[in-house]
Image (cartoon, rainbow, N blue to C red):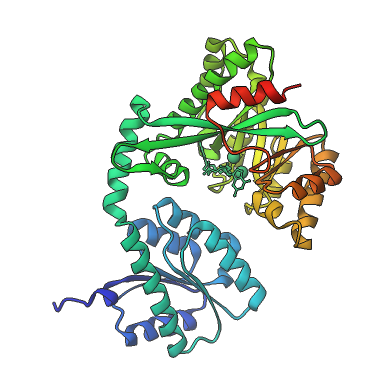
Amino acid sequence: MPRLRPRFARRILVLNDHPVELALFQNMLAAMGYRRVTAASDAAAAVAAVARQPHDVVISDIATGIAGSASLLTELRGMGRVPPVIWTSGLGEELLQSHVRLALEAGSASVQALPMPVSAAVLQAAMETALESLAASQEAAPAPLQRRAMETALRRALQTGAGFSVVLQPQVDLRTGRVVAAEALSRWRHRTLGEVPPADFVAAAHRLGLDGRLFERVVDAAAGVLVPLHAEGLAVPVAVNASASTLCDPALPAMLERRMARAGLPARLIKIELTEDEPVGDWVVLSSALNLLRVRGFELAMDDFGAGIASMRLFSAMPFTELKIDREFIVHMHRDAASRAVVAAAIDMGRSLGRRVVAEGVEQERDLALLRELGCDAAQGYAIARPLAPRDFVDFCRAYSP
Ligand code: C2E
Ligand code: CA
Ligand code: CA
């Protein structure tokens, strides 16, 4: 068999629920020379295809729905890298643009939107853009090898703790300026790989099924900071990030209780921050896990409120004690009326339900003033403090505690 030239050996996924359009894309790609084209007529088939083997470019119609698009992006992200995405649609620019944002947020480095009908020339140009971006990102990170090396190193590091540390970012009360809580953020520095970004090693821990181990490490580090504070009478709860699958481990509540009891700390000093970085698999299991944690006295925060697809449903269905408004809205609220409206509505909703509302990613003094005006309870961000090493955090608490 003749060898395919590299660009034509790229594996392309086409998702379209309209059989004629699907065939049209297949024909155009075949005529351009692409020989490895997977056709899927619904999101489930597309998810199954990318789970079977990696694809280099995704061309997807948005008519299959935002939930289908999101599940495909989640699957791609779980595999380590979201490839270039080309959305197609006859449904109008606004919907296309919201899908563009979705794919960018999922981590794709190249996202294009093509209104239907798509001509061969337009598709060819879009494919060239996608493949250029793919080549650039593969040069920057020779993915599979580096990923495997990272996973091997991470497995070892999670056993021994080597290179792991935790930094703490304070949250202050917007009326009093006192520190009222903190978020624990993991850091991992490897001997040869250097500083690995949390997004990369957290995703890898999930792939390895070691997210629970990471969670335990962060809880222990948080307890290490809480013990001296508690001894000084400073009650500053520390939040630990966890995704739904981590929290659904039935052994987790007992593990948390054991660790807190061993450190001589009350449960209310640990807050669990649910990150919506994966869709909730089983709502009943998650709800019973969160309710159990609440009953045992742990606080529960919903992270990145407004950013995830199921934010509203999750917040109303689960027993959260706190809502954290996503950074994206905070960063843009001073010049974007829509972001400001979302922030104001989230604050009102949280307050009317008796939940604490925290704004995250507060970078400017003027944002602090506006949040205060809107009635937000607490803020976290560079305008207050960067994430701090444990010792510096303890000093910060001594200086700014009630
Ligand atoms: P996140 O939970 O949304 O955490 C907040 C991130 O925003 C942190 O990034 C923090 O350093 C950064 N940040 C804080 N204030 C500001 C600000 O004013 N402006 C801007 N631009 N950024 C700010 P980091 O530490 O890189 O963490 C990234 C993400 O990785 C976290 O996002 C969280 O989802 C995840 N992560 C970190 N540590 C852990 C962990 O131990 N477990 C899990 N499951 N996820 C973790
Ligand atoms: Ca968080
Ligand atoms: Ca967050």
Quadrant location, ligand no. 1:
top right
How many numbered dots are placed on residues in this image? 0
Report if residue 297 is visible in the image: no
Q: Nearer the viewer, residue 148 or 47?
A: 148
* Looking at the image, residue 90 lies above or below residue 158: below
Which quarter of the image is occupied by the C terminus? top right
Q: Give the residue displayed 14% in from the left and 79% down from the top.
A: 2
Tell me if 56 is positioned left or right of 332 in this view: left
Tell me if 241 is positioned left or right of 156 in this view: right
Report if residue 196 is visible in the image: yes
* Looking at the image, residue 307 lies above or below residue 93: above
* Looking at the image, residue 375 lies above or below residue 85: above
- Quadrant for residue 298, please give it: top right
Residue 94, position as x, y percentages in the image = 67, 73
Q: Nearer the viewer, residue 397 or 184?
A: 397
- Quadrant for residue 175, please give it: top right
Residue 374, position as x, y percentages in the image = 84, 46
Residue 257, position as x, y percentages in the image = 56, 17
Q: Give the residue displayed 75% in from the left and 62% down from the top.
A: 336
Point out the residue furthest to the left here.
1
Q: Give the residue displayed 54% in from the left and 23% down from the top.
A: 391
